[in-house]
Amino acid sequence: MFYRPHDGHGLPHNPFGAIVTPRPIGWIATRSADGAENLAPYSFFNAVAYAPPQVMFASVSAKQDRGDTKDSVANIRETGVFCVNIVEYAARDRMNETSGPWPRETDEFVHADVPRADCETIACSRVAGAPASLECRMTQIVPLKGRANFAVFGEVTGIHMRDDCLIDGIFDITRFQPLSRLGYRDYARITEVFTLKRPGE
């Protein structure tokens, strides 16, 4: 099968999200200028550079009470900071609960009973007990083609790692089974890891 996206795919559901998989999930915590907290998952998320460490996530829809975007991007526009929390399998239900189209004033930490802690380098909350959290200062917000599509880039200014995930100096993802996004309503967890040595190493 071949199709051009602007012509449509003719399938019951859009296959694009099922093709580009698995995708890590960034559980993005933000705080508005007036102190309102927000927590929401984004599967268009990844690390993009080592030195300095940088990450990005993309928001691809809007809410009526936020104009051209959603709470996360709107808050980052105001404050310039955000925290990316890594999602483990054990937190799947709470993560999913924070994905709803809740009103602007909803604090998803409270709504989904997610424990919070203060960040160290930015004025923002993080998910307490997450396998890892990345405190970030926004470097740029890039409007993407299409309605309500924005890519947010940030420099990582602080990194939290849960002690039980550090084994012999290695951040061991098998200790917490990272959750990843597939297509449709599907998710996966990583339970097996193997190593490949690059040529020339």
Image (tube, helix red, strand yellow):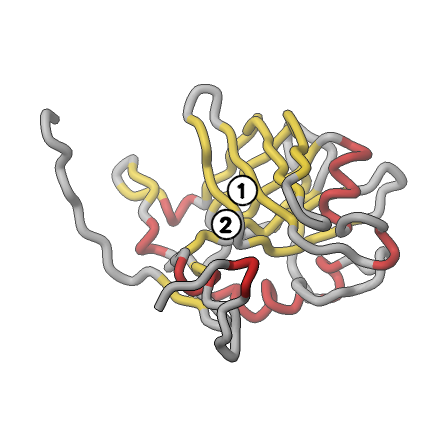
Q: Are marks 1 and 2 in contact (CB under 8 Å)?
A: yes
Q: Within the image, what quadrant is residue 81 found in?
A: top right
Tell me where residue 110 appears, x and y as whole percent: 75, 61
Question: Foreground: 28 or 94?
Answer: 28
- The residue drawn where x is 70% and y is 55% is 61
Please name the amino acid that badge 1 sits on.
Ser
Please name the amino acid that badge 2 sits on.
Ile
- The residue drawn where x is 57% and y is 43% is 57
- The residue drawn where x is 68% and y is 37% is 143
Left or right, 110 with reference to 127: right
> From the image, which quarter does the N terminus lie in?
bottom left
* First-in-chain label (1 vs 2): 2
Residue at image mark 1: 133
- The residue drawn where x is 54% and y is 42% is 133
Residue at image mark 2: 86
- Outermost residue on the left side: it is 200
Q: Within the image, what quadrant is residue 23 found in?
A: bottom left
For mark 1, give the secondary structure: strand
Question: Foreground: 44 or 114?
Answer: 44
